[in-house]
Image: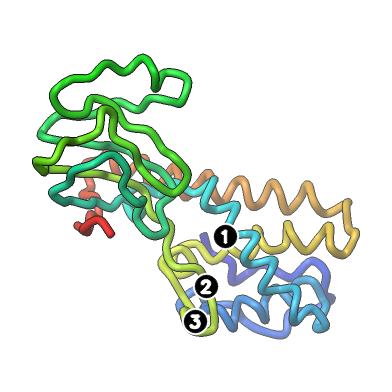
Amino acid sequence: GAVADLVPPYAETATYTLHEDLMNYSKLKEVIADWSNRQDLVTQIPVFIEMTEARLRRDLRDKTRMTQRAEAMVYGEYFPLPCNWVETTKVIAGGRPLRLTDSFNIERVELSEGPKFYRHAGDQLQLLPAVGSDPISFEMEYLEFPEALSDTSPTNWVLDTYPDIYIYGAMLQVAPFLMDDARMPMWAQAYGEAVKAANGASDKARASGSALRLQRHGLA
């Protein structure tokens, strides 16, 4: 959503004009400092952004932009999850879709020809039963969060597309740091509505038949 007309609620006047096409990591840090009316948070603001990204990994589900696919010939039982993975949406092994199971059901899986189930074990994907010594085709569709913002990676598609989510999310971290509990509900609502709008736009695009932006990767 557009954020150019919003006035920083902590500052008496805005000292900048915010344009989405100019937003990057450095500008984002400036905006957060201005909105909090605190220029002494130089070391804290990057942490607020990191905390926002951690929360976005749980909340943002723009499947038109986040969906990726990995393909490989595999054997064995455990495989590393792709970099920046946040959620698995589909696993196919040997041409057969696998079902997600959990540790409670793991002992109930009977041996058979080829895997029937998968589960997440830390930062790995486990196939059940394990694949024998003869490799089989493997395909995994998953959601990927983009590279975290930094001085060397100053932008990503989330910041380009939804700068308001980053700003509201960071301000939600600023408020308790400044002991401004009164504003936390406001920032929580703004952040929640922005994320809901982003996820809703993605669902609407998928329902209308817009193509997913799939990229194919190999397993590490």
In what element is the residue under mark 3? Answer: helix
Q: CA distance from mark 2 to mark 1?
A: 9 Å
In what element is the residue under mark 1? Answer: helix
- Tell me if label 2 and label 1 are in contact, CB under 8 Å: yes
Q: Residue at x 80, y 51 (%)?
A: 184
Residue 175 vertical position relative to residue 131 in the rendered view, above or below: below
Quadrant in the picture for the C terminus = bottom left
Q: Circle 1: is it few (<14), some (14-19), or many (20+) Cα within 10 Å? A: many
Which is nearer the eye, 135 or 159?
Answer: 135
Q: Position of residue 134 (x, y in %)?
A: 9, 41
Q: Residue at x 44, y 39 (%)?
A: 121
Q: What residue would you read off at disc 1?
A: 53
Taking the image as shown, residue 5 lies to the left or right of residue 61, namely: right
Please, what is the three-letter code of the amino acid marked with disc 1?
A: Glu
Q: What residue would you read off at disc 3?
A: 22
Q: Residue at x 18, y 43 (%)?
A: 75
Q: Circle 3: is it few (<14), some (14-19), or many (20+) Cα within 10 Å? A: few
Q: Which mark is residue 74?
A: none
Q: Is residue 136 visible?
A: no
Q: Is residue 69 visible?
A: yes
Which is nearer the eye, 19 or 123?
Answer: 123
Q: What residue would you read off at disc 2?
A: 149
Quadrant hosting residue 44? bottom right
Q: Position of residue 78 (x, y in %)?
A: 32, 43
Residue 43 vertical position relative to residue 92 in the rendered view, above or below: below
Quadrant hosting residue 52? bottom right
Please, what is the three-letter code of the amino acid marked with disc 2?
A: Leu
Q: Position of residue 71 (x, y in %)?
A: 17, 51
Q: CA distance from mark 1 to mark 3?
A: 20 Å
Looking at the rendered image, the disc whose residue lies closer to the viewer, 2 or 3, is 2
